[in-house]
């Protein structure tokens, strides 16, 4: 399966799950006395100012936000896997190219038999943040800035939405998917 199709499939899972959420909300709104509706623990305040509809809206709005955050993370981790598979493959090609070039030189170079050690290993790049420098010259400046926003947003989500780690982004999930797919296009 192509890298872009893999990301598109994650996005389709997200839209399908939201369709299920919408159907569940409609079902609960139609009849709150069904076994299904009762099983969803909707926080209805008895005797408070909050109407039953407001409680249903709040519950399903929060569910939408949770699904979106989870699928943003799933998109980004899927992109990371694709990226690291490409890095592993490229590393092997570079290592062989350098070794072959060193073998063909007329004058031996010190440490030529260790030429592969002079190349950064995939293990040296353990995170998406660590690939930023590699991608900086590979993708457009606009995509690079967008990638930095995505990484900051991911860090913000993963670390409990703390202001000290990462930051929230105004990018929606579809924009994130498109940016990641554009990056895949540019890196080849």
Image (cartoon, rainbow, N blue to C red):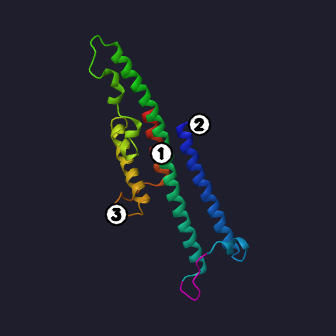
Report the quarter where the N terminus lies.
Answer: top right
Considering every residue shown, the one lying at the far bottom of the view is 47
Q: Dot 1, crowdedness within 10 Å: few (<14), some or many (≥20)? A: some
Give the residue at mark 2.
1
**Could you tell me residue 82's position as x and y percent?**
49, 40
- Residues 149 and 99: in front is 99
What numbered label is drawn on residue 163?
Answer: 3
Q: Secondary structure at mark 2?
A: loop
What numbered label is drawn on residue 178?
Answer: 1
> What span is colored magenta in the figure?
42-49
Q: Quadrant of residue 14?
A: bottom right
Marks 2/3 in contact by CB < 8 Å: the verdict is no
Q: Dot 2, crowdedness within 10 Å: few (<14), some or many (≥20)? A: few
Residue under the point 52% across and 57% down:
70
**Could you tell me residue 20's position as x and y percent?**
64, 60
- Residues 71 and 80: in front is 80
Cα separation, mark 2 vs mark 3, equals 38 Å
The nearer-to-camera label among 3 and 1 is 3
Q: Secondary structure at mark 1?
A: helix
Q: Looking at the image, is mark 3 or mark 1 earlier in the sequence?
A: 3
Q: Is residue 127 above or below residue 102?
A: below
Q: Is residue 72 above or below residue 122?
A: below
Residue under the point 34% across and 25% down:
114
Q: Dot 3, crowdedness within 10 Å: few (<14), some or many (≥20)? A: few
Q: Is residue 9 above or below residue 29?
A: above
């Amino acid at each position: 399966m192509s890298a872009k199709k893999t990301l598109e499939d994650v996005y389709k899972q997200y839209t399908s799950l939201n369709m299920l959420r919408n159907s569940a909300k409609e079902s609960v709104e139609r009849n709150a006395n069904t076994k299904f509706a009762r099983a969803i623990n909707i926080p209805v305040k008895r005797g408070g100012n909050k109407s039953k509809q407001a409680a249903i809206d709040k519950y399903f709005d929060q569910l939408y936000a949770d699904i979106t955050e989870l699928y943003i993370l799933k998109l980004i981790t899927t992109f990371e896997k694709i990226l690291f598979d490409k890095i592993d493959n490229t590393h092997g090609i570079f290592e062989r190219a350098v070794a072959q070039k060193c073998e063909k030189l007329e004058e031996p170079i010190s440490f030529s038999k260790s030429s592969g050690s002079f190349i950064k290993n995939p293990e040296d790049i353990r995170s998406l943040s660590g690939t930023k420098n590699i991608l900086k010259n590979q993708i457009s400046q606009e995509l690079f800035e967008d990638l930095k926003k995505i990484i900051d947003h991911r860090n913000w989500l993963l670390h409990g939405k703390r202001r000290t780690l990462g930051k929230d982004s105004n990018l929606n999930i579809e924009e994130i998917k498109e940016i990641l797919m554009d990056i895949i296009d540019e890196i080849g």
